[in-house]
Image (tube, rainbow, N blue to C red):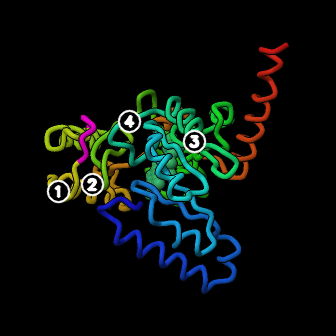
Amino acid sequence: MVSAEVKPYSNIMIDTAIRVREENPDMKKHFKVIFTSAGDPVGWKDKIKGAGFTWMHVVPSVKGALRCKKAGVDVIVASGHEGGFHTSWEPVHSMILLPAVVDAVSDDHTLVCGAGGFCDGKTLAAALVLGADGAQMGTRFLSTQESDFHQIWKEGVVAAQDRGTLVARGFVGPARWLKTPRSDEHAKNTLAKLPGVFLGTPDDYTTMDMSLIQFEIESIKAVYEGDKEKALMAAGEVAQRINDMPKVNDMVQGIIKDAEDILRSVPKKYLA
Ligand SMILES: Cc1cc2nc3c(=O)[nH]c(=O)nc-3n(C[C@H](O)[C@H](O)[C@H](O)COP(=O)(O)O)c2cc1C
């Protein structure tokens, strides 16, 4: 995250990543991409691309995508409001955002990736049909055998049903959480203390009631202690479509195969 609130830490993290990679030849072979998000991409190019990384930046709007173009980002991730954890102050969903970003910025040098709501072959095929070069899946990978998220979090994603998430304050803005009595309480507190989260009017640490951030910190600590009652667990709306905890390799192969089958079947069905 490179938002204003955390920028000093972003610098430390990126500098450390670059240094550690330089010191470790094995890491240099495998660690090739840096993602930035939640802030302005302009100004980070020299550091990230200068160190030889492919650079991906996450945006919630066409305006953000145009900033990426100006900043020299390699792959722009258009992140819809369905997505897990931090979402935009002014929400736009993937079905609108992704083709709008593709139309605005996609060219031979600028790839576009959809994020928010993608979890299977069907949704990957949809992203490609909307003009994207790929899809980023967060909540889907959270609930896999290899994922190192706490078991209660992984099980929470699998258990989520219809309308299984809500939005309430996160560290750097609105965030999407699994719906539980605890997140419901957090949403009610957010509405009372920081209604801007629901009105699309950003606030920051200089003006806001920090009790919400304190609540979030305690609730995330509770996740790692396995305390279900106090835990706040981030996830995307797509949690309601995720019902298993597969091994990553099987899952990825299955997603690719399903997407290919769907993309082949569409012309047969509609263009015979
Ligand atoms: C628990 C969790 C933590 C996340 N943390 C970050 C993060 O630190 N930076 C970021 O750019 N995106 C983060 N994301 C967003 C994902 O990278 C991805 O864009 C998003 O999950 C896609 O939507 P989906 O959840 O519908 O798949 C996070 C998502 C989840 C569920």
The outermost residue toward the front is 70
Residue that mark 3 sits on: 114
Image depth: mark 2 or mark 4 in front: 4
Quarter of the rendering containing residue 87: top left
Query: Which residues are drawn in magenta?
Result: 198-202
Gap in angstroms between the C-alphas marked 3 and 1: 33 Å
Q: Earlier in the sequence, mark 3 or mark 1?
A: 3
Q: Does the residue labelled 3 lie within 8 Å of ligand 1?
A: no
Image depth: mark 3 or mark 1 in front: 3
Residue that mark 1 sits on: 210
Image depth: mark 2 or mark 1 in front: 1
Residue at x-position 56% and y-position 50%:
76
Can you give x and y, in whole percent of width and height, for residue 101 in the image? 54, 39
Residue that mark 4 sits on: 91
Callout 1: SS: loop
89 left or right of 102? left
Q: Earlier in the sequence, mark 1 or mark 4?
A: 4
Image depth: mark 1 or mark 4 in front: 4
Callout 3: SS: strand
Tell me the kind of residue under disc 3: Gly
Residue at x-position 49% and y-position 43%:
79
200 left or right of 50? left
Callout 2: SS: helix
Gap in angstroms between the C-alphas marked 1 and 4: 23 Å
Residue that mark 2 sits on: 216
Can you give x and y, in whole percent of width and height, for residue 121 in the image? 69, 35
Gap in angstroms between the C-alphas marked 2 and 3: 28 Å
Residue at x-position 30% and y-position 55%:
171
